Image (spheres, rainbow, N blue to C red):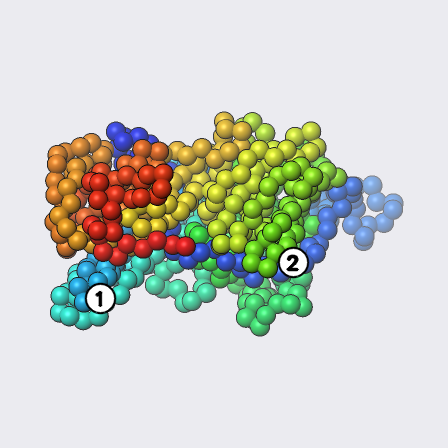
Amino acid sequence: MKKFTAILLTVAMALTLVACTGKSKDTKKTKKTKKTKKTAVETDETEEPTETPSETETETETETDPTTLPNVLTFDESLDYIGLSTPYEDWGYYAVFDENQGETYTYALVADRLEIPTSGYDDLQNAIDSDIAQMRDAEIDEFLEEGPQFLQDHADGKTVSTLIKGFRTPIFRADTKIFSYALTESKDLEEGEFLTYNYLSETGDRLYQDDVVLDRQGLADYFTELFLSSDSDEEFRAWVQKNVGDILDGHLEFTMSYDAINVLGEGYSLDNNYYAYKIPVIGHENLFNLEYFGDTPNVYAIRGDINDKLVWDVDGDGQLDEIEADSVYTGDYGPETAVLTVRYNNYTFDSSVENLDVISYDVDELLFMKLDDGNYLYVRMTAPDGFVDTYIFKIENNQLTFVDMCYDFFRSGGLIDPSCFGVAGMMDTLGSGIFYNEASALNNDGKPGYLYDYWHCEEDAVTCKKDIKGTAVDPQTLDPIGETTIPAGTCVRVLLYNPMTQSLIVETLTEDLDENQCVELDFKKDEDWNLTVNGTDINDLFYSIMFWG
């Protein structure tokens, strides 16, 4: 099984283990999940929680029983990350060319691997392995058995089709207190099914609903209030009812973040096959065991809720702050005008007043990041063509200042570590593809800075129409080995691409995974978007070239 564990920082760097590496396969364009705009439960910023006696106490009592104190959320930055923000990956590809159809078909597996690089977490690692390693190993074994059969079926004249399988485990917390992740893709899961895992990091002890939730009925009511509205369709109503039943039975599947638990539901975007529905703790502290919430590392990220709202002590002054984003657009076939409004406490940023040209029409997600150089807000918006833009604001002096706009830079519904998180971008090389990198928002005025020069791709394969010359490179260092020729009829896939230098590296796909070769092609893309290899149009060199849009 080939292993891809990092993208290269430079051409000369080795493919070594990187703690935050994780990519996902999903060629679907972004679409909105079942987000219903509904007024969330409001938190009164002016009322500070105080340790008052319970209603059963009399006025004459002078000592307070600590068991009767209200559940109060406190904030501090006492935690550290444990070195695993996104999963490592194992991957493998088989491909065949159907001469009758003139098409290339791919059978592949991309499987996440959760390995904690920091010492002292053996119990946690053993718990993770005990819970999912058997499922993961079975998926890999099945792929290694079915891959050669895929090739044989094609050789026997049987019909084959493209299938990219995944074993996906997005991480929602990975700090010295809590490790939380979900299994979102696996052959063991039914459609729409997700498994979740929460552990105490120090001991590896697993946390379940009744460890985290103090009031089943109260959470069931809160869940219904958050997500059920008059315009919810029957499918979504059924999803809400199922989860309410799980809550009342004490069997809710959930992940944990610093300020909430999350319940996963079906939904597709550029990078995920799920949507994480956030259930905030703030405003309903009495429902939760607050031992597990409020603490963070000194830099961190927190998502908004389904209403694109976030309540949190943003500036660390002991007072709750409130952030909310909304958008208004007009136009029959996409917005002729779009206005983004972002509110931070009593300050409102209006894109039309600030002369900010907003090219997207609907707020998709809100993300707050506390960084080394300040506090930042990221508003992710959906564009008319299904693509996504992210608008970056700095929170300073009780107001919002626009910093920059970038395209689709954060991927996971569980983005937690601003120093290393997944990014995705659409690029044209041997056809259109989704490419992945990692980025850091530190030391860069809140803007994502890419950690590696090369972007990694997991798209389907193409097939050489002719012999194609290139340079064989070392798969670990990318150092040139020597000139080589890829024979006509060979299936290849795009592996790495450096958009700054236009360096394109493909992997040849053979019957033996260990015999695959990495080859750098003389790829060029000019100002008129003419794409060539060795000076020849790519459509004259490859079958199965496909561009989007």
- Asked whether the viewer can see residue 302, the reply is no
Q: CA distance from mark 1 to mark 2?
A: 46 Å
Who's the residue at 22% across and 38% down the image? 522
Task: Kindly identify the residue that appears in the image at 19 percent across and 59 percent down.
Answer: 96
Q: Which residue was labeled with disc 2?
A: 37
Q: Is residue 100 visible?
A: yes
- 10 Å crowding of disc 1: few (<14), some (14-19), many (20+): few
Which of 409/236 is in front? 409
| Residue 396 falls in image quadrant | top right
Q: Nearer the viewer, residue 491 or 137?
A: 491
Image quadrant for the C terminus?
A: bottom left
Left or right of 305 on screen, residue 9: left
Three-letter residue code for mark 1: Gln
Q: Position of residue 443 (x, y in %)?
A: 50, 27
Residue at the disc numbered 1: 101
Number of numbered discs present? 2
Mark 1 or mark 2, earlier in chain: 2
Residue at 56% over, 62% down: 34
Judged left or right of residue 140, residue 211 is right
Between disc 1 and disc 2, the foreground one is: 1
Q: As drawn, is 313 to the left or to the right of 11? A: right
Q: Which amino acid lies under the numbered mark 2 shown in the image of this protein?
A: Lys
Single out the residue that lies furthest toward the right: 60
Seen in the picture, residue 444 relative to 234 is either above or below; the reply is: above
Q: Categorize mark 2 by other alpha carbons within 10 Å: few (<14), some (14-19), many (20+).
A: few
Expressed as whole percent of the image width and height from the top left, the position of residue 322 reads 69, 43
Rendered image quadrant of residue 232 = bottom right
- Image position, residue 281 (x, y; %): 63, 49
- Work out whether residue 449 or residue 316 is closer to the camera in this orientation and state it: 449
Q: Residue at 38% of width from left, 40% of height from top?
A: 437
Mark 1: secondary structure: loop
